[in-house]
Image (cartoon, rainbow, N blue to C red):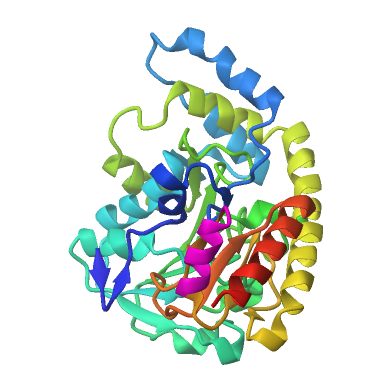
Amino acid sequence: MRTEGHDLRHHGDAEVRDDGSALVDLAVNVRADTPPAWLRERIAGSLGSLAAYPDGRAARAAVAARHGLPVERVLLTAGAAEAFVLLARALKVRQPVVVHPQFTEPEAALRDAGHTVDRVLLREEDGFRLDPAAVPEEADLVVVGNPTNPTSVLHPAASLVQLARPGRTLVVDEAFMDAVPGEREALAGRTDVPGLVVLRSLTKTWGLAGLRIGYVLADPETITELERAQPLWPVSTPALAAAEACVEPRALAEAGHAAHRIAADRAHLVAGLREFAARGVRVAEPAEGPFVLVRLPEAAAVRRRLRELGFAVRRGDTFPGLDERWLRLAVRDRGTVDAFLTALDRALTAR
């Protein structure tokens, strides 16, 4: 789907398909060292139940307990992407607004459902930070990511709450919030914000993109509407086993440690990128997610050269609000980052 030159259906995995499968992957925002062995064992242990239809009650209750909510406020989905489709199809929306740059599936899903979508474009000179006053008052659905993919901006929870009002659905995509130490600025679990819908993914931190598991947190009426739009048994038995495992105290502690490690690795990557400032490289800062957004001259040529040197990075021009000058880089371990920075030095020299 293209609108005004932006391919809303392009995602990072396109960079590592086919001839890109052998590349070092900095294009996909899924942790590279996952899923851990204990989680693989839990998933494998569910395979003996595949003859039975999936029963999501235990996983739903576990997710609800993790956020201190009643089960009526939780809906399990086949990844956060399914949730965007359900919202677009199930809710009676007249004037949806998507805050960009951000993950493009929400707008694509709304357009596929027949909606006309307005955009609020955040600006580089403002640090891609949201001014709540920029969102039109008449918008009855507002979608924003936090931390935002691809800008890595973590919006203050107080700013997002300012967007809420009676008659408006406020969708906050927190797919990467568990990669933020302490989950600062999270709205998951809040019940005092009118119209709030929070989306979470378990595929990023736990390396489960191929399993498809996420969930929606919202008021019971909204959950009921979304559930009616789902097919029967939408989440597989292995995915339900993973959901239950990933919200247990042991897993939450492991995710917390991983978030601190990601923050340290991101700081190392950003420091290395700053060394190229004299050659036109600019990092969108402060970065708070497991990825960074970088602007540089002739980014498309640099990206192609990086592929020749063995590294895949995400093009930025498919995100509304960005153009061909931007690349998104997933945070990886220090050894991988150092090798990438060496390759970037060569790619910039070869322009």
Asked if 5 appears above or below 42 in the picture, the reply is below
Q: Position of residue 147 (x, y in %)?
A: 60, 65
Is residue 287 a member of the stretch shown in magenta?
A: no
- Say which of 78 and 14 sits in front: 14
Please report the residue visible at 33 percent of the width from the left and 83 percent of the height from the top.
138
Please report the residue visible at 65 percent of the width from the left and 34 percent of the height from the top.
246
Q: Quadrant of residue 153?
A: bottom right
Asked if residue 42 can be seen in this view, the reply is yes
Asked if residue 164 can be seen in this view, the reply is no
Q: Position of residue 134 (x, y in %)?
A: 46, 88
Asked if 127 appears above or below 254 in the picture, the reply is below
Asked if 91 appears above or below 288 in the picture, the reply is above
In the rendered image, the quadrant that contains the C terminus is bottom right
Q: Position of residue 255 (x, y in %)?
A: 73, 43
In the rendered image, the quadrant that contains the N terminus is bottom left
Magenta-drawn segment: 300-310
Task: From the viewer's perspective, tell me whether residue 300 is left or right of residue 284.
Answer: left
Q: Position of residue 77 (x, y in %)?
A: 43, 40
- Say which of 107 and 16 sits in front: 16
Task: From the viewer's perspective, tell me whether residue 226 is left or right of residue 217.
Answer: left
Please report the residue visible at 58 percent of the width from the left and 92 percent of the height from the top.
125
Please report the residue visible at 71 percent of the width from the left and 79 percent of the height from the top.
276
Task: Residue at the far left: name it.
Answer: 114
Asked if 78 appears above or below 135 in the picture, the reply is above
- Say which of 113 and 258 sits in front: 258
Q: Quadrant of residue 267?
A: bottom right
- Magenta portion: prevailing SS class: helix
